[in-house]
Image: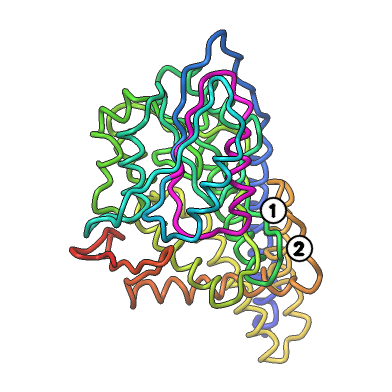
């Protein structure tokens, strides 16, 4: 008896089940109910530091959203750029200048100057901000994010409610204003690929061995224990490394179940590849193996299903290709469903090819990071070593 025709359906069925099991595990992690922290009788003063280089999509709206935080305590906001020649400088000066004077609110635009060799521009701004901060708590916010009005309050409430915590931070949701294929790829990368893995790794306690620094609030005690943000000197991925140091110092990195929007738009294919390379290099500089393993396993299952489908068709086993092809379709659907569960945007029909090819792109991008350790980020070029640290003189 010829068992070859039975191999493809059996393999396809196995892959379908394994992909479905992995999907359900991630979906359950996403759907864990949020338990809001208790309100505080008195809210500590917070200094919010936002490093900026260049004009992001919606830069003005992002800055206004940060200033419009409904925080009951004192809130100092520092927008920090390299020089006055940055195109974002006049925008930030105008946004801050247009703010009416208010009790418990202060905003300022500062200049950090060009970073020294071996330090990213972002970390250079963070170091200046920490030195100038007046608040009891010190927070950091990326310039491409647009927080909801209550996010700082929730981050502080969770931080105070968890005495063991050294910091709290928000999960991110990518959503574009001007959707192109590159934006869809970025949304899928950030939301179902990265965001779902974060939910799974954080567990019911919401604790991770690193920080997602798009919006984080830190205690001065935790920062002092690690030598301040300057502990990340020489690191390309500053927030993840700071989180690792805080965890080693005996504090917890706590993620809250309230998302922060990352604003994107108009990403072409070349721009998306650059962003993808940067994220891939980020993952090599601070994400533990247990965190990245689910996506690697899902990727292996997808390529196995894709290969089984191609092999069945190549040998003329048309019916044998049905179940492997169904496993491929399930993987594509899984990305779309996880994105929806996370609150991300729907994918238009014209872009449904993106989740099909994204794993292939990921494999090629991963290979490129092994062959070329240079990365461009916000107008600067960095040279990285094998552990994604800045090489000596690795900033331009």
Residue 84 at what x, y percent from top left? 41, 56
Q: Which residue is mark 2?
A: 347
Tell me the element at label 2. Answer: loop
Q: Residues within 10 Å of mark 1 (few under 14, many from 20)?
A: many
**Label 1 near label 2: C-beta < 8 Å?**
yes
Residue 360 at what x, y percent from top left? 56, 75
Question: Who is closer to the viewer here, 99 or 120?
Answer: 99
Residue 244 at what x, y percent from top left? 33, 40
Tell me the element at label 1. Answer: helix
Measure how far apart labels 2 and 1 are at the Cα level.
9 Å
Which quarter shows the C terminus?
Answer: bottom left
Residue drawn at 50 percent across, 29 percent down: 106
Image position of 141 with respect to 278: above or below: above
As for residue 135 lying within the magenta part, the answer is: no
Residue furthest out toward the left: 392
Residue drawn at 43 percent across, 41 percent down: 211
Task: Judge left or right: residue 148 versus residue 210.
Answer: right
Residue furthest out toward the right: 349
Magenta segment range? 50-79
Q: Which residue is mark 1?
A: 339
């Amino acid at each position: 008896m010829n068992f070859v025709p039975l191999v493809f359906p059996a393999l396809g069925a196995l892959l379908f089940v394994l992909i479905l099991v992995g999907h359900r595990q991630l979906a359950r992690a996403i759907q864990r109910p949020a338990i809001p922290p208790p309100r505080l009788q008195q809210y500590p003063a917070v200094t919010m530091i936002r490093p900026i280089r260049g004009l992001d999509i919606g830069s003005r709206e992002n800055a206004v959203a940060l200033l419009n935080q409904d925080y009951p305590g004192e809130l100092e906001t520092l927008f920090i750029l390299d020089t006055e020649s940055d195109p974002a400088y006049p925008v930030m000066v105008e946004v801050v200048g247009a703010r009416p004077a208010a009790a418990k609110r202060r905003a300022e635009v500062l200049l950090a100057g060009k970073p020294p060799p071996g330090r990213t521009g972002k970390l250079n701004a963070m170091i200046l901000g920490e030195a100038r901060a007046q608040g009891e708590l010190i927070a950091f916010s990326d310039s491409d994010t647009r927080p909801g009005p209550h996010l700082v309050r929730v981050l502080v409430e969770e931080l105070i409610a968890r005495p063991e915590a050294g910091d709290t931070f928000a999960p991110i949701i990518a959503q574009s204003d001007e959707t192109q294929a590159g934006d869809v790829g970025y949304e899928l990368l950030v939301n179902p690929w990265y965001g779902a893995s974060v939910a799974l790794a954080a567990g019911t306690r919401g604790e991770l061995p690193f920080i997602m620094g798009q919006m984080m609030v830190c205690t001065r005690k935790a920062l002092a224990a690690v030598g301040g943000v300057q502990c990340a000197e020489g690191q390309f991925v500053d927030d993840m490394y700071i989180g690792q140091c805080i965890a080693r110092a005996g504090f917890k990195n706590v993620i809250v179940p309230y998302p922060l929007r990352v604003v994107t738009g108009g990403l072409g294919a070349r721009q998306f590849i650059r962003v993808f390379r940067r994220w891939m290099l980020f993952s090599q500089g601070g994400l533990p193996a247990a965190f990245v393993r689910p996506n690697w396993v899902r990727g292996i299952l997808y390529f196995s299903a894709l290969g089984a489908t191609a092999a069945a068709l190549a040998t003329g086993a048309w019916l044998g290709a049905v179940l492997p092809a169904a496993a491929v379709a399930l993987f594509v659907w899984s990305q779309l469903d996880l994105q929806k569960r996370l609150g991300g945007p729907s994918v238009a029909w014209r872009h449904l090819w993106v989740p099909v090819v994204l794993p292939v792109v990921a494999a090629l991008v991963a290979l490129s990071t092994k062959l070329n350790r240079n990365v461009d980020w916000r107008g600067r070029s960095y040279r990285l070593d094998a552990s994604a640290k800045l090489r000596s003189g690795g900033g331009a």
